């Protein structure tokens, strides 16, 4: 049985991590995810991806420690752990649909996504320090940028879990929904994104990535100097003319992605 199930739904690619019992990720699964995310990146007709976990208890328990103890090499693939944590050239949005525990590398996979939808029962944790390890698949890098520093440091230094309700309160999670409505909510969000101009969506993600650490003035300077090619491409595209034209004519725009 494949550890990663891929399904197209229109312009959305849905990836389901399916490794009972805890959807732990070994090196082979990480490489499989890397191939799936690369396919999403490279196919222009795919605009949004959703990644979720099979079953009801685990989004992912993270790195497969049993496989590691048995000699797993840890060769994750070009996208880094879970295929996404170091795929820095992916300029399309990814939604994590967290259906249960997102622990360790599972939480790091969710943090590498652009948006998170979670069930009310979902839990998030970076318990690595309790095992003498470090959350080095992006957790220690991304979490302090997504939460107030004191909150992020508490989670990383103690390993305590955070509930979906708390994650929503801090703005880490976009939507908290009852379990039966998880995929419906994630698909609704994906659909809203897919209705927008694809080049504009990719430009927004590129701008956020390129200027996230910059003062606003420096961010403007980078844009004006051509430092974000995706912004220039979107601004000069046919789609940039089609959007205002469709609005003026009272119709839905027809995006060409060019």
Image (cartoon, rainbow, N blue to C red):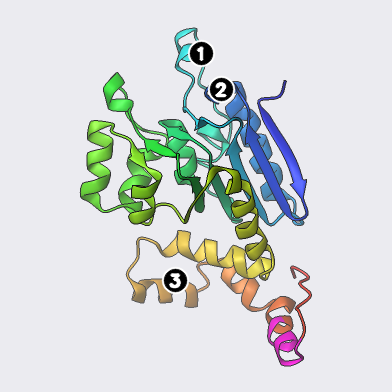
Q: Position of residue 140 (x, y in %)?
A: 33, 39
Report helix, strand or loop for mark 1. helix
Left or right: where does residue 11 sit relative to residue 171?
right
Q: Residue at x 68, y 66 (%)?
A: 198
Q: Position of residue 130 (x, y in %)?
A: 27, 23
Q: Position of residue 103 (x, y in %)?
A: 42, 31
Q: Nearer the viewer, mark 3 or mark 2?
A: 2
Q: Nearer the viewer, mark 1 or mark 3?
A: 1
Q: Residue at x 20, y 48 (%)?
A: 150
The circle drawn on residue 222 is: 3
Q: Nearer the viewer, mark 2 or mark 1?
A: 1
Left or right: where does residue 75 sit relative to residue 172?
right
Magenta-highlighted residues: 243-250
Residue wearing tag 1 = 67
Residue wearing tag 2 = 27
**Measured Cα–Cα span from mark 2 to mark 1:** 9 Å
**Measured Cα–Cα span from mark 3 to mark 2:** 38 Å
Disc 2: CA contacts within 10 A as few (<14), some (14-19) or many (>=20): many
């Amino acid at each position: 049985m494949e550890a990663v199930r891929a399904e197209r739904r229109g312009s959305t690619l849905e990836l389901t991590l399916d490794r009972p019992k805890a959807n732990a990720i070994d090196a082979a699964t990480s490489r499989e995810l890397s191939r799936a995310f690369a396919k999403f990146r490279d196919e222009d007709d795919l605009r949004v991806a959703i990644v979720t976990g099979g079953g009801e208890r685990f989004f992912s328990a993270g790195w497969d420690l049993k496989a590691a103890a048995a000699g797993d090499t840890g060769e994750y693939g070009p996208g880094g752990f879970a295929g996404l944590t170091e795929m820095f050239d992916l300029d399309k949005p990814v939604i994590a649909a967290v259906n249960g525990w997102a622990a360790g590398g599972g939480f790091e996979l969710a943090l590498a996504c652009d948006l998170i939808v979670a069930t009310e029962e979902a839990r998030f944790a970076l318990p690595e320090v309790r095992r003498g390890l470090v959350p080095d698949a992006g957790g220690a890098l991304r979490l302090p940028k997504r939460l107030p520093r004191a909150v992020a440091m508490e989670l990383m230094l103690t390993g305590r879990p955070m509930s979906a309700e708390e994650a929503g309160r801090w703005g880490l999670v976009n939507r908290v929904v009852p379990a039966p409505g998880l995929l419906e909510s994630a698909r609704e969000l994906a659909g809203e994104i897919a209705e927008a101009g694809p080049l504009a969506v990719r430009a927004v993600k590129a701008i956020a990535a390129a200027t996230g650490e910059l003062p606003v003035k420096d961010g403007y300077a980078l844009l004006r100097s051509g430092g974000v090619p995706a912004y220039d491409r979107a601004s000069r595209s046919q789609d940039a003319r089609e959007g205002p034209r469709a609005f003026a004519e009272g119709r839905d725009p027809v995006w060409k992605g060019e």
